[in-house]
Image: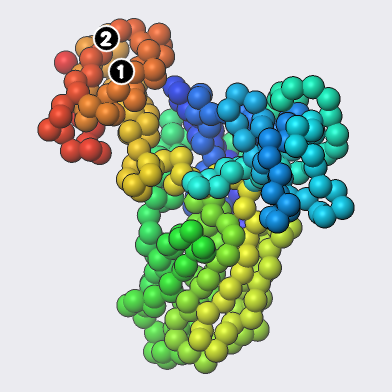
Amino acid sequence: MSRRTYFIDEGLGETRGGVLLDDRPERLLIQRNDDSQRLALGARLRARVRHVEPALAMAFLDLGEGAEASLSFKPDSRPRQGEALEIEIRTEARVGKLATARLIGPAQGDPALLSPAPSLIDQLRDMARDGELITGKAARQIADEAEAEALEILHPLPGGGSIAIEPTRALTAIDVDVGERKGAEAKRVTRQANLAALGVAARVLRLKGLGGLVVFDMAGRGHDGAALMAAARAAFNPDNPGVSIGPISRFGTIELTVPRRTRPVTDILTDASGRISARTLAQRLVRRLEAEGRASPGGQLSGRCAPAVAEAAKPVLALLSARIGARFEVSADPDAPWDRIEVHAR
């Protein structure tokens, strides 16, 4: 029987929390101190209809403080431009897409946050049920490992083989590779790899926060469609309600849709070019300085990183100074590789 635990790493400038499924990362939620509460999943707001597109059956909403969302409507319930509505955030924004809203009813007044989204700890408790909570140093290590796995493309399968998960604007493609998986009978080896791939992919998609259309390119041919469908339903059951799974095609692919809810982890951790963002590297720099400061009480600390990372770290370094004292300096080295961070105690 599967076992879930959850963790909270309360860092400076950001809090990371997540769920472990049988000791492997299954969810990763990241909240940074400058995130807009108005765009968080489950937040309730009073919004103003900024623009209506009848041809798309969509209204664009002003949530206040520069935040926006879209609202789909039926032909007989078309909102009016300038109208005030009470809404709830149904899916968080992602790169190139606005957050989407669910209509609660009419409202009066200017855009405002009426009630914030559920707290991170409440979300995790709901996901992990009665699981044990992990905090402190262990939680930080787990969060680091979850973050690293969420950024990977290739993911190993138990018993050998791997899957590659690559999102595009239209869909997320998953390729199953048997690799050097051992076994006397090729058909059985392929079947085992495909069944394992569904379970691993479901966990990793939840970890990455990916949804929408997902297409599996299964290994081999002559598939056991009934067994694959049963495995897919079990693997993606935690994503319900809203999962829809199609039968395996004659081309050896399985298509399914998974509800989009939270912002993809890669949107948080990377920049527009797909590389790790300056803010993410700044958070890593501060965590390393904090850890080194605890290991060397009273010692002087030095850090070295790329200039953009040093600039992004300034607000969080101010928080670190309040916690451990102003006993560190960070050098912005224009010759430093983008993702290299060096921290030393003197």
- Please report the residue visible at 58 percent of the width from the left and 57 percent of the height from the top: 211
Question: Label 2, label 1: how many angstroms apart (C-alpha)?
Answer: 9 Å
Q: Residue furthest left?
A: 335
Residue 132, position as x, y percentages in the image: 61, 39
Circle 2 packing at 10 Å, graded few (<14), some (14-19), many (20+), is some
- Please report the residue visible at 63 percent of the width from the left and 65 percent of the height from the top: 257
Whether residues under marks 2 and 1 lie with C-beta atoms below 8 angstroms apart, the answer is: yes
Secondary structure category for the residue under label 2: loop
Residue 239, position as x, y percentages in the image: 66, 57
Sequence-wise first label, 2 or 1: 1
Three-letter amino acid code at disc 2? Arg
Residue 163, position as x, y percentages in the image: 42, 68
Q: Which residue is mark 2?
A: 327
Residue 19 visible in this rendered orientation of the protein:
no
Q: Is residue 259 left or right of residue 207?
A: right
Which quadrant does the C terminus fall into?
top left
Q: Depth-wise, is mark 2 or mark 1 nearer the camera?
A: 2
- Please report the residue visible at 76 percent of the width from the left and 44 percent of the height from the top: 102
Secondary structure category for the residue under label 1: helix
Tag of residue 293: 1
Q: Is residue 318 above or below residue 139?
A: above
Q: Is residue 256 above or below residue 241?
A: below
Q: Is residue 227 above or below residue 58?
A: below
Residue 274, position as x, y percentages in the image: 35, 48
Circle 1 packing at 10 Å, graded few (<14), some (14-19), many (20+), is many
Along the line of sight, which residue is nearer the eye, 264 or 219?
A: 264
Q: Is residue 175 left or right of residue 126?
A: left
Three-letter amino acid code at disc 1? Gly
Q: How is the image coloured?
A: rainbow
